[in-house]
Image (cartoon, rainbow, N blue to C red):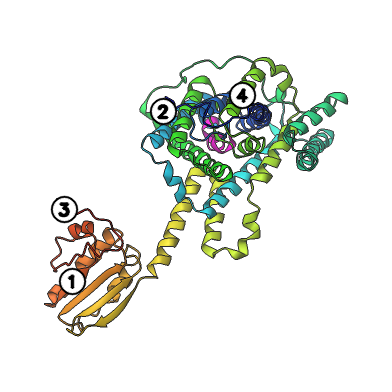
Amino acid sequence: MKNTISLFDFSKKINYKNELLAGFTVAMTMIPESLSFAILAGLSPLTGLYAAFMMGLITAILGGRPGMVSGGAGATIVVLIALIKSHGIEYLFAAVALAGIFQMLVGVFKLGKFVRLIPQPVMYGFLNGLAVIIFMAQIEQFKITDSTGASGWLQGMPLYIMAGLTALTIAIVYFFPKVTKAVPASLVAIIVVFAVVLSFDIPTKTVEDIAHISGNLPSFQIPQIPFTLETLQIIFPYALVMAGVGLIESLLTLSMVDEITNSKGNANKESIAQGIANITNGFFGGMGGCAMVAQTLVNLNAGSRARLSGIIASVMILIIILFGAPFIEKIPMAALVGVMMMVAISTFQWVSIRIVNKMPKSDIFVGITVALITIILHNLALAVLVGVVIAALVFAWDNAKRIRARKSIDENGVKHYEIYGPLFFGSVTAFMDKFDLMDDPDEVVVDFKESRIVDMSAIDALDKLSKRYSQQNKKLCLRHLSEDCHKMLKNAEAVIEVNIQEDPTYKVMPEK
């Protein structure tokens, strides 16, 4: 049990003061972001707070990375906005629970390591696209809906007030850290704007105008949807996308914490914890979520290195849900809009613009493509998948051009082809062009000491090559192949030489 749940690792000294203060600070930074993302998706703000509480608590206890913070994050809820608008909140809860199941399966089958396959340009595009989505969503808060249900832009004094308060929020979030980082700038901004609105009795849009918050404990409820195949077809793609986006962001955050703390987290354990948390969200009225980069950095900067701060932060959020609802409803929307605009600005990878002239053109293309798919389709998982595929094809093309052969004839008249570079689907055509079947002597040796047989396309190419030499009544020998390749080539018509002992690449167990 100690290996599964270790809230207090007594082998390491825990600074309880740092954990307590870090937990309180994290809770204060999670609340405005969770509220803003819930409102962004057209949900009750309480749905966002429930997600922050449940995600934070469960992942803090069961997760694979002490010090990491999870909550109702925008990356996951953005991909579900279309489902909410077309089918309603009950379908959202079902999709969140199903996404949790997918995430658990990733952890159970130990697939978390594959997040390492995501190239940096894909991440730049992913984060830049997400930043644009978050920023543009805040512009929508400058609209108002009249009694007939028609929406239009704010005009006149209401527009000036909203814009002014938003600008004040942005200024505080930007400049306050230059004074002190002891208190979260976003929290200070919300308090200051709140105080200004109350002191001068400024008429402006508040959280209460969006939705009312009832401060009750989250209660168990099975999503009220028809349990049919048609329903599964509706929620399945959304759940798959959410699961993918949530795990990508969570496992990349885990890697970031590993670097900062110079320690090693458990990606598969974190995947299971994320899954359990989202399943709980689906049945207890939370909007779902994943790891939160900004809050994790706040937690680490506050000195937390254990699970305790995450638990404290979650309990603080629950207390606020139960007793702070009247206060939260009075928060000006301009304050939340300003905070989220700064979140978008900080999420955008400005370094990707500064180094654009130093990056390969293929990487620039990948980053822009991922960003555009994210912005246009709001499908972050598809964007990442397309980016990975393009990057993989570019890599394959580059490696396909690197295969070459050194040719020589020994004293016995045997021609040797020493192959350099990987032999795979992209390089088989160039590989086949290296051979001169008509002019080669009766015996030819192909040496794979500096090459690798990567896939079935390579095996098929060798099989075809051996058949061509056989048709010319010439003998083809393949040297320095591993035993697994030898078995796959056993049906080839040529004679195959396998030198396992001198194989520099493969570690092959001798046959019994």
Q: Earlier in the sequence, mark 2 or mark 1?
A: 2
Q: Position of residue 231 (x, y in %)?
A: 41, 28
Q: Provide the secondary structure element on which disc 2 rests.
A: helix
Vertical arrangement, residue 481 with respect to residue 123, above or below = below
Residue closer to the observer: 425 or 489: 489
Alpha carbon distance from label 3 to label 2: 52 Å
Task: Give the crowd class for mark 4: few <14, some 14-19, many >=20 residues within 10 Å.
Answer: many
- Callout 3 crowding tier (Cα within 10 Å): few <14, some 14–19, many ≥20: few
| Residue nearer the viewer, 213 or 486 | 486
Q: Which residue is mark 1?
A: 477
Query: Of the residues under marks 3 and 1, which one precedes in the sequence?
Result: 1
Does residue 459 appear left or right of residue 365 in this picture? left
Q: Report if residue 160 lies within the magenta region.
A: no
| Residue pictured at 38% horizontal, 39% vertical | 110
> Which residues make up the magenta segment?
73-84
Q: Residues within 10 Å of mark 1 (few under 14, many from 20)?
A: some
